[in-house]
Image (cartoon, rainbow, N blue to C red):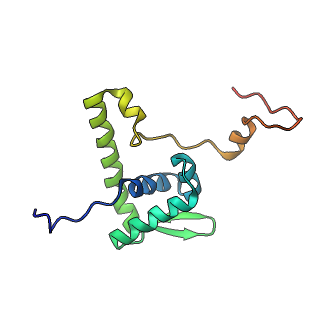
Amino acid sequence: MANSEQRRLPPAQALHAFDAAARHMSFTAAARELAITQAAVSQRIRLLEHQLGQTLFLRHARGLELTEAGRAFLPAVNEAFARLSTGLAEAFGRRAARRSRYARRPASPPTGSRRACTPSSSAIPAPACA
């Protein structure tokens, strides 16, 4: 395929934001995972949608829903990150793959359990966490 015919690939940061938002069905939870702001996740998703010419998420007051285009695109993104992680592991070892930004992070624990295990500066002692 000639260079002029190749479609420019979306930025990796936008794909990473899409992957995290689709797994969590939340821009806020994706932002926590990626250590960026919710606004940055939203901006990256909008950039990706603009570049693809497709809406990937339906935004509702209480969350997100993948559109048909988003559901169709998600397996390709998942496979791409899995292949990158495998390639890193094969070329540089498992340790490098785990440290990579392409490594999958588990979903965050529910907010309530995170708060219960977070030390606070208040005079009330926090519950012990296992």
Across and down, in percent, residue 72 comes to 34, 62
Left/right of residue 5 with respect to residue 30 in the rendered view: left
Residue lying furthest right in this view?
123
Q: Residue at x 40, y 69 (%)?
A: 49
Across and down, in percent, residue 102 comes to 39, 43
Q: Residue at x 10, y 62 (%)?
A: 1
Q: Quadrant of residue 128?
A: top right
Left/right of residue 68 with respect to residue 20 in the rendered view: left
Left/right of residue 115 with respect to residue 96 in the rendered view: right
Across and down, in percent, residue 3 comes to 14, 64
Residue lying furthest left in this view?
2
103 w.r.t. 53: above or below: above
67 w.r.t. 125: above or below: below
Q: Residue at x 89, y 35 (%)?
A: 123
30 w.r.t. 60: above or below: above
Give the quadrant of the C terminus: top right
Q: Residue at x 39, y 38 (%)?
A: 100
Across and down, in percent, residue 18 comes to 43, 57
Q: How many marks?
A: 0
